[in-house]
Image: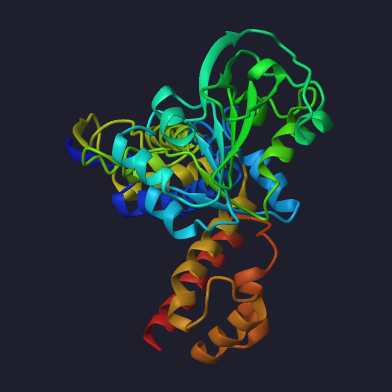
Amino acid sequence: MTGPATTAVGPTLAQRWRGLRWVLLAIAVVVGVAALSTYLTAPRPGGRLEAGSTSPEGARALVTLLRDRGVDVIEAATIDDVERAARPDTLLVVAQTWHLYGDELLGRLAEVPGDRLLVEPASDTREQLAPGVRRGESTQWGGLTPDCDLREATRAGTVQFQGADTFTAAGDTPVIRCYDGVLVRYTEDGRTVTVVGSSFFMMNGGLLDEGNAALAMNLAGTHPRVIWYAPQRSEEGGDDGGASVLDLIPIQVSWVVWQLVVAVVLLALWKGRRIGPLVAERLPVVVRASETVEGRGRLYRSRRARDRAAESLRAATLHRMVPRLGLGPTAPPPAVAQAVAARCNLSAEAVSHTLYGPAPATDTDLVNLARELDDMERLVAQS
């Protein structure tokens, strides 16, 4: 006799979710910890001469040294910040960037009170903020000695500029020239203006060469209050220079996230694979349950496996009786024997011998054990 049968292959959706939810939770925790630690420890590239930038062209090292020395360094992001913080006793450090341009912006900077330190200024910046000097020749020398009487330069000694512009006096104003004109200083209308034709000695990448750190500290640390202005966005033409959320995420975090996404996808494919869909196939033979029992019994008899047969009968009886007794699958044998004895009006010793006793010695004993188990199960079911 033949008939169709449906074979279920693969776990159900609920089983799959129960197996994966803890894995997904662990992955989420790992992603969160990795992203947080990477963000906190990642360098801040920033822009050229930006006070908080840790890139080779940034100025965070110099700003940190100044603050450790007791100098109040104010990081000004806009011209409005400069105007609010400026006082007659402050030093305004203006670092030339691509966003420092425009007559209006430079004109407002020229009205700011206090001394000035111009770092590698462009022509328009120099004309507006340091009109007492004009540009000279450029130099490619790696190291220069001061050759002047300026205290800040003589204390620093030889400095590595790695290419710089030089400056000379534009009129009759007396100008102090150091390092062959790379560093000039003059005083006009009670204001001291210092112009440097190179920014390398102030950057993170060049601060450790020769006397670079000493010169940078001597020039920027002469006042107790310093305004650091290295604009990183344009303030003219309506460009607000705002950064999106993605721009604020360090590149290291992006790489970690993408790697974890790939790992999660591969894990999902591995855990979620199936041998195949549910199929209905026609079995060549349908075997009755009674025939299966008889076949197994013949195998036990041919091998004289009375112990295995008795163990199988007792285990099946206990599996069906224990729930009716209100006991769990891990109930100890004495508790089961007491519960069965109470239901069947039998002695606990007899019940324990039947359910947990030794293996039958003969086939007749095995048949008697099967009858006793059947009677005991019937009494429990009827009680």
Viewer-side residue, 224 vs 322: 224
Estimate the x, y position of residue 309 in percent, counting from the top left. 56, 53
Quadrant for the C terminus, please. Answer: bottom left
- Front-lying residue, 271 or 313: 271
| Residue 236 coordinates in the image, percent (x, y) | 26, 39
**Colouring chosen for the image of the structure:** rainbow
Residue lying at 28% horizontally and 42% vertically, measured from the top left: 8
> Which residue sits at x=76%, y=30%?
153
Residue 151 lies, with reference to residue 76, above or below; the image says above
* Residue plotted at (63% across, 32% down): 185
Whole-percent x and y of residue 147?
78, 19
- The residue nearer to you, when weighing 342 against 274, is 274
Q: Is residue 203 visible?
A: no
Instruction: Report whether residue 286 is seen.
Output: yes
Q: Residue at x 31, y 44 (%)?
A: 242
Left or right, residue 328 beside residue 254:
right
